[in-house]
Image (spheres, rainbow, N blue to C red):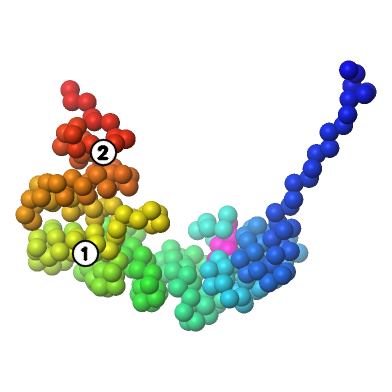
Amino acid sequence: MGTRNRPRLRHKRSPDPLAARIRAADDGDSRAAADVVHWLLPARRPQRLALARRYAEMASSGKDSEAADWAAVCFLYPDSCGGWEDPRGNGADPKWALGVLRRLARAGNVHSMHSLYLAYWRGAGVARDVDVAERWARRAAKHGDCEPLNNIGVSFREREGVRRDIRRAVRCYRTAAALGYPMALRNLSKCYEHGEGMRKDDRRSVRLLRRAVRLNPPLRSRPAPCASAWFDLGWRLVHGHGVREDRGRGLRLLRRAAKAGWETAQESLRDLGPTTTPTGLRPRARG
């Protein structure tokens, strides 16, 4: 069959995702408006930048708090919508973005409180101010987001970008732990275990770990469980460190942490013997 008589194949044009999101945004979808802003930035041409600002205003005035926060964050540092370099050459408007974020945060938008904590902690679009970042983190914690306050505690304990201040770290841990954040309970337990910023107390350390485990059940709906709390309590129960030895329950917690991807738990199970290794983990060869 010659090429002249061969039937032509008609290729269907794939729909333009940006055009579809623009139509949805024009119909009042705040999430679609935020997506349009994300696609349009970074922008160097005035027309593209004006269009991004228009849809950012639409998203920030909608009822979807997460979409409003995302649109403002894109204007705060639009370099790949998440870079921390100075983005003014890419169409950023930190003054406008911070104004929107403050307005949303004062109205109770916890996503904007988290974004303001990050902006002040890292100095994105504003001068770095650790104290202001901590204030926004505490406000976010009161509204249910304790992750920023726990992260500040970790930074002060581990010298991550700040001078070590164990007392300030413990204050952050205590506040987040009192609100039931499992990772803060685990971190506060480590402080009691090693006597950092307070008197060493193994019993209280174990009580905090038990509470962290109770508040952190192995649910599939939780993407990042606090596997370190499972490991810490499991290791203590297996070895009887500060608590009565319970090898069976300790191994169950270690297996749970190992299946969640905690590498230290996987190594501990290999060292304890091949019979304790959960399915899917190969025992380490002993030379």
Is 281 rendered above or below residue 34? above
- Magenta stretch: dominant secondary structure: helix
Name the spot of residue 97 as percent of width and height, x first.
57, 72
Please tell me which of labels 1 and 2 falls first in the chain. Answer: 1
Query: On the picture, is 53 further left or further right than 148?
Result: right
Which residue type does callout 2 highlight? Pro
Instruction: Please report the residue visible at 18 percent of the width from the left and 34 percent of the height from the top.
Output: 275
Which residue type does callout 1 highlight? Arg
Image quadrant where one finds the N terminus: top right
Name the spot of residue 213 as percent of width and height, x first.
24, 59
**The image quarter in which residue 36 lies:** bottom right
Per the model, the C-alpha gap separating discs 1 and 2 is: 25 Å
Mark 1 — residue? 211
Name the spot of residue 52 as percent of width and height, x first.
68, 65
Name the spot of residue 118 as percent of width and height, x first.
44, 66
Secondary structure beneath dot 1 equals helix
The answer to whether residue 38 of the structure is visible from this angle is yes
Per the rendered image, the range of residues in magenta is 73-79
Most distant residue in the bottom direction: 107
Q: Which mark is residue 190?
A: none
The answer to whether residue 85 of the structure is visible from this angle is no
Secondary structure beneath dot 2 equals loop
Residue nearest the viewer, comparing 27 with 150:
27
**77 part of magenta stretch:** yes
Instruction: Please report the residue visible at 52 percent of the width from the left and 56 percent of the height from the top.
Output: 83
Residue nearest the viewer, comparing 191 with 287:
287
Query: On the picture, is 230 further left or further right than 69?
Result: left
**The image quarter in which residue 4 lies:** top right
